[in-house]
Amino acid sequence: QNSPSAFMLLKTVGAAYLLWLAWLSFRAGASLALTGGGGAPFPGYAALYRRGIVMNVTNPKVSLFFLAFLPQFCDPSRGSMALQVLSLGLLFMLATLVVFFSVALLGGRLALWFNKSPGGQILIHRAAGLVFVGLALLLLLSGK
């Protein structure tokens, strides 16, 4: 931000890239992902679960959340701090499990529904294109 011209160039290049992605999305047709059209094979639920665990364990933001945020809700006068942090962590994991499972279930059902319909796939591509155009405009019109 010390160089306004370099910052504007970076914003313009970023917006141009987003517009390129939008153009590709608008031009994309229906794919044959579920009909054996050469898409990547489904890795299986266990492999996806393991991938999610590894991603969360290696994500420093998750560790920072537990180290910086949860202790603020602990009170030394209520007993062991370690036990309080553990309890809050377990409650967080339970809530996360319920929410993420629900999102994954809904996302999976929607994906099956959209992948069965070429019109649905085109609708998703167009929606993604609109999101890319919106992000490009926000980037170009941002004040900083």
Image: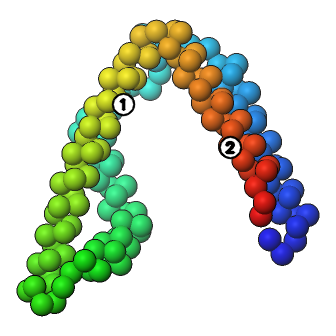
Left or right position of 129 against 68: right
What separation in Å lies between label 2 and label 1 (alpha carbons)? 23 Å
Q: Could one spot residue 40 in this view of the protein?
A: yes
* Residue placed under numbered mark 2 in the picture: 135
Residue at x 34% of width, y 74% of height: 69
User: Is residue 97 shown above or below 80?
Assistant: above
* Residue placed under numbered mark 1 in the picture: 107
Residue at x 62% of width, y 22% of height: 126
Residue at x 10% of width, y 85% of height: 78
Q: Could one spot residue 14 in this view of the protein?
A: no
**What x and y, as percent, mark residue 121?**
52, 17
**Quadrant location of the C terminus?**
bottom right
Residue at x 66% of width, y 30% of height: 130
**What x and y, as percent, mark residue 123?**
56, 18
Residue sitting farthest toward the right: 5
**In the rendered view, how is the structure colored?**
rainbow
Identify the amino acid type marked 1: Gly
User: Is residue 61 shown above or below 27?
Assistant: below
